[in-house]
């Protein structure tokens, strides 16, 4: 979400996207960042994180993010 915010500030993004599309980007970024442990899928699998076990080592963090909504 932070990177998206930085991009919006640095680029005149409204030349390329509508305000609704930009709002949707922020919503998607927020959804991606919910409960993100600051590690990646490979690490979750390597340490046998409960989420990796739950999601059978398939897109562990992405499945977790989506399950919260």
Image (cartoon, helix red, strand yellow):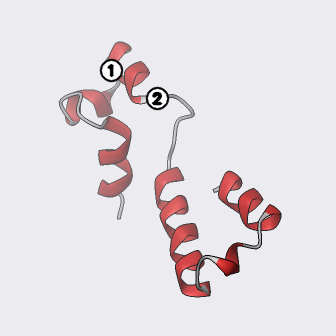
Give the farthest residue toward the front. 15
Query: Disc 2 versus disc 1: distance between alpha carbons?
Result: 9 Å
* Quadrant position of the C terminus in the picture: bottom left
Say which residue appears at 58% left-offset and 85% top-offset. 18
Q: Check the image and report above or below for 29 versus 17.
A: above
Q: Is residue 53 above or below residue 29?
A: above
**Residue 55 location in percent, x, y?**
21, 36
**Residue 38's spot in the image, x, y percent?**
57, 33
Q: In which quarter of the image is the N terminus?
A: bottom right
Question: For the view shown, which residue lies furthest in the top direction?
Answer: 46
- Residue wearing tag 1: 45
Q: Is residue 59 left or right of residue 8?
A: left
Q: Residue at the spot x=39%, y=29% of the render?
A: 41
Q: Based on the displayed image, in which of its 4 quarters is residue 15 positioned?
A: bottom right
- Please tell me the numbered disc located at residue 29: none
Q: Residue at x 66, y 59 (%)?
A: 4
Label number found at residue 40: 2
Q: Which of 20 and 27 is in front in this view?
A: 20
Q: State the SS at label 1.
A: helix
Q: Quadrant of residue 30?
A: bottom right
Is the residue 32 above or below the residue 10 in the image? above
Which callout, 2 or 1, points at the residue further toward the start of the chain? 2
Residue at 31 percent of width and 18 percent of height: 48
* Percent position of residue 51, x then y: 31, 34
Establish if 26 lies above or below 34. below
> Looking at the image, do the residues carrying marks 2 and 1 touch, with CB atoms under 8 Å apart?
no
- Please state if 18 lies on the left or on the right of 52 as rendered: right
Quick one: SS at disc 2? loop
Q: Is residue 67 left or right of residue 42?
A: left
Are there few (<14), some (14-19), or many (20+) residues within 10 Å of tag 1?
A: some
Tell me if 27 is positioned left or right of 50 in this view. Answer: right
């Amino acid at each position: 979400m932070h990177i998206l915010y930085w991009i919006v500030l640095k680029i005149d993004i409204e030349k390329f996207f509508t305000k609704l599309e930009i709002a949707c980007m922020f919503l998607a970024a927020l959804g991606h960042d919910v409960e993100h442990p600051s590690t990646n899928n490979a690490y979750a699998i390597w340490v046998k994180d409960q989420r990796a076990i739950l999601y059978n080592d398939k897109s562990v963090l992405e499945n977790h993010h989506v399950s919260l909504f």
